[in-house]
Image: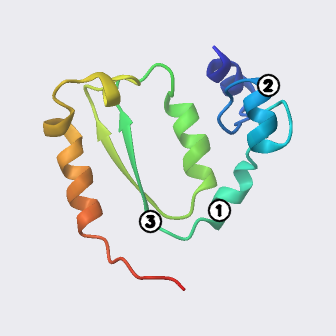
Amino acid sequence: MAAWSQRETYDLKLFDVSDSWNLNKYGTSNSPSINVDELKNIDVNLQLYVGGNDILADETDLQFLYDKLNHYNVIKILQYGHCDFFWDENADVVYLNNLINNLNNLDMKLIE
């Protein structure tokens, strides 16, 4: 439900476990907000896997994200809902093999 409440205001936050965990990790009992405008600073081509039947992240939510990004490619899996990405027993066939293949084809350069 916490994720749903974030959706209503588009106040995206870092992972929130508990007051004590947050205090240890972030230095505050509340998980900090993510400045979504800083997403424009990501200078890589992101691959976004989205579900065509997602009632938790609908087209309005996706458009909000797309408007904040510079470089992205959308891979829409029409039959998937929000949780199918981690619950589907056939995820390897549906998208994971594609994802791994794309990762293997990246031009990785060591940054010193």
Badge 2 marks a residue whose secondary structure is helix
Direction top: furthest residue: 1
Q: Which residue is mark 2?
A: 19
Tell me where residue 111 appears, x and y as whole percent.
51, 83
Ranked by sequence position, the earlier of labels 2 and 3 is 2
Crowding at dot 3, Cα within 10 Å, few <14 / some 14-19 / many 20+, comes out as few
Callout in the foreground (2, 1):
2
Q: Which residue is mark 3?
A: 45
From the viewer's perspective, is 19 left or right of 102? right
Amino acid at circle 3: Asn
Badge 1 marks a residue whose secondary structure is helix
Callout in the foreground (2, 3):
2
Q: Residue at x 55, y 49 (%)?
A: 66
Tell me where residue 30 appears, x and y as whole percent.
82, 31
Q: Residue at x 29, y 61 (%)?
A: 103
Q: CA distance from mark 2 to mark 1?
A: 30 Å
Colouring style: rainbow
Amino acid at circle 2: Asp
Ranked by sequence position, the earlier of labels 2 and 1 is 2
**Is residue 43 in sight in this rendering?**
yes
Q: Residue at x 49, y 64 (%)?
A: 71
Ranked by sequence position, the earlier of labels 1 and 3 is 1
Badge 3 marks a residue whose secondary structure is loop
Q: Which residue is mark 1?
A: 40
Q: Is residue 95 above or below residue 21?
A: below
